[in-house]
Amino acid sequence: MLLRGFAKHFKIDMEVPFRELPEKVQQVLLHGSGDDEIEFTYWRKGAWRKMTKPFEGVIPNLERLYAETASEFTKSRLQQFMVGMPCPTAKARACVPKASPSP
């Protein structure tokens, strides 16, 4: 539902590889649409429904899931994609670098 609504809003084909998407679309997909609302449609109780809201973004969604879940299995799965690294800007603290487009 969410990705179909996202693709429709940005007029992109869901079969297009991430690296071929415009940089703006890549950034919104990864980090969210901020205050910009996107229309999403879904099937519930025998009818199509519409909902308009900001797109959360893949990275904020995974961060929220990790923070909110009580499931050790889910945390373990998400940790497989996490990398701890010192932040060159913050010196000793870790930070999350801005994702760069795929080559």
Image: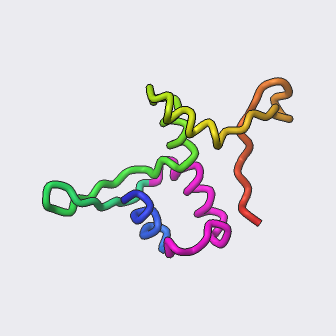
- Is residue 76 found left or right of 9 in the rendered image? right
Q: Residue furthest left?
A: 46
The residue lying toward the viewer, choosing from 78 and 18, is 78
Q: Quadrant of residue 93?
A: top right
First to last magenta residue range: 12-36
Reply yes or no: does residue 13 show up in magenta. Answer: yes
The residue lying toward the viewer, choosing from 38 and 100, is 100
Picture layout, residue 20 above or below residue 27: below
Picture layout, residue 94 above or below residue 27: above
Reply yes or no: does residue 14 show up in magenta. Answer: yes
Identity of the residue drawn at 72% across and 63% down: 102
Picture layout, residue 3 above or below residue 15: above
Residue 89 lies, in percent from the top left, at 83, 34
The residue lying toward the viewer, choosing from 9 and 16, is 16
Residue 27 lies, in percent from the top left, at 62, 56
- Is residue 79 found left or right of 92 in the rendered image? left
Identity of the residue drawn at 57% across and 34% down: 76
Q: Quadrant of residue 22?
A: bottom right
- Is residue 81 found left or right of 34 in the rendered image? right
Q: Quadrant of residue 60?
A: top right
Identity of the residue drawn at 86% across and 35% down: 88
- Is residue 41 found left or right of 47 in the rendered image? right
- Image quadrant in which the C terminus is located: bottom right
Picture layout, residue 64 above or below residue 13: above
